[in-house]
Amino acid sequence: MIEVIKSVDDLSRQKWDVLVPTMGALHAGHQSLIKLGKNLGEKVIVSIFVNPLQFENKADLENYPKSFDQDLQMAQEAGATAIFSPSESDIYPGQIEKIEAGSVGDIFEGKSRPGHFSGVLTVVKRLFDLVNPKHAVFGEKDFQQLFLIKKMVNDFKLPVNIVSAPTIRDSSNLALSSRNSRLSDEDKKVAQVIYQALTQNNIDDARKLLEKVDGFSLDYLEAIDEQSFNLATPDAKNKRLIIAGWVNGVRLLDNAVVE
Ligand code: PAF
């Protein structure tokens, strides 16, 4: 039976091999992170904490889906040892020492969501300090988040190994996200254009496709250099196409390697 840990004292009585940080509303994408975690170590803990600090938009925070009982079941099914479900005062007991996300924190996702990455890094660092895992697993779907977490671990020399896991898609190739639960079937059809764009031969065709679909509102589409997260120059070794946009008010992100 999966253990539910609510207090920091109970958490620190045990040693954890792997942390999978989440904001709940678990889906098959999260389960793939937990399963990957199980290959890295025996004791896998999944944190569930909807972090107010990373929501610049109050309505988005309030509308964030919550499904704790189902989360427990899904985490257990995937092989997690425990769920850590802290209160806001466990995570932020006193004055918050915010982690700055630097210049990459202000572009693309960070430009549209000011302060978002500082909020993400602050909570992730706090979770690392509390759980002290050997490994932590994050999905590639939030590629800029993954880049900034790796950078923070490197900058602060944190004793944790960051492992990334590929994006999981549904049968229509829509990247799984907790926010998808707010999409109607019609919205999901519109959202299919994201993957179609990612599989075009060039960025101009991808942009044309995204701009012509009714109901999809493009925020950004860019090819970035995975090394620096800056716009890719033609000679960049590892390039990735990143996309963000809205369908019916729901923000969706995706990315793919440029072959
Ligand atoms: O990707 C997420 O779900 C969140 O940004 C994270 C990493 C759990 C931090 O709140």
Image (cartoon, rainbow, N blue to C red):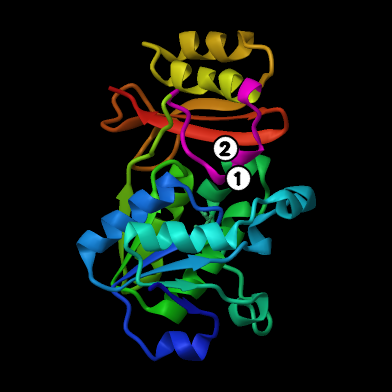
In the picture, measured across the screen, residue 123 lies left or right of residue 175, that is right
| Tag 2 secondary structure | loop
Determine the image quadrant of residue 153: bottom left
Question: Cβ of disc 2 within 8 Å of ligand 1?
Answer: no
Q: Is residue 107 visible?
A: no
On the image, the x and y values in percent for residue 133 come to 34, 74
- Which kind of residue does numbered mark 1 sit on? Gly
The stretch of residues the image draws in magenta is 172-186
In which quadrant will I find the C terminus? top left
Instruction: Give the vertical position of 241 relative to 163 (above or below).
Output: above
- Within 10 angstroms of label 2, few (less than 14), some, or many (20 or more) residues? some
- Which kind of residue does numbered mark 2 sit on? Phe
Question: Cβ of disc 1 within 8 Å of ligand 1?
Answer: no
Q: Residue at the location (62% across, 8% down)? A: 212
| Tag 1 secondary structure | helix
Instruction: Give the vertical position of 191 relative to 70 (above or below).
Output: above
**Which residue carries the number 1 mark?**
110
**Which residue carries the number 2 mark?**
108
Q: Nearer the viewer, residue 219 or 99?
A: 219
In the picture, measured across the screen, residue 256 lies left or right of residue 186, that is left
- Within 10 angstroms of label 1, few (less than 14), some, or many (20 or more) residues? some
On the image, the x and y values in percent for residue 168 come to 38, 38
In whole angstroms, how far apart are the C-alphas of marks 1 and 2?
5 Å
In which quadrant will I find the N terminus? bottom left
Q: Is residue 190 visible?
A: yes
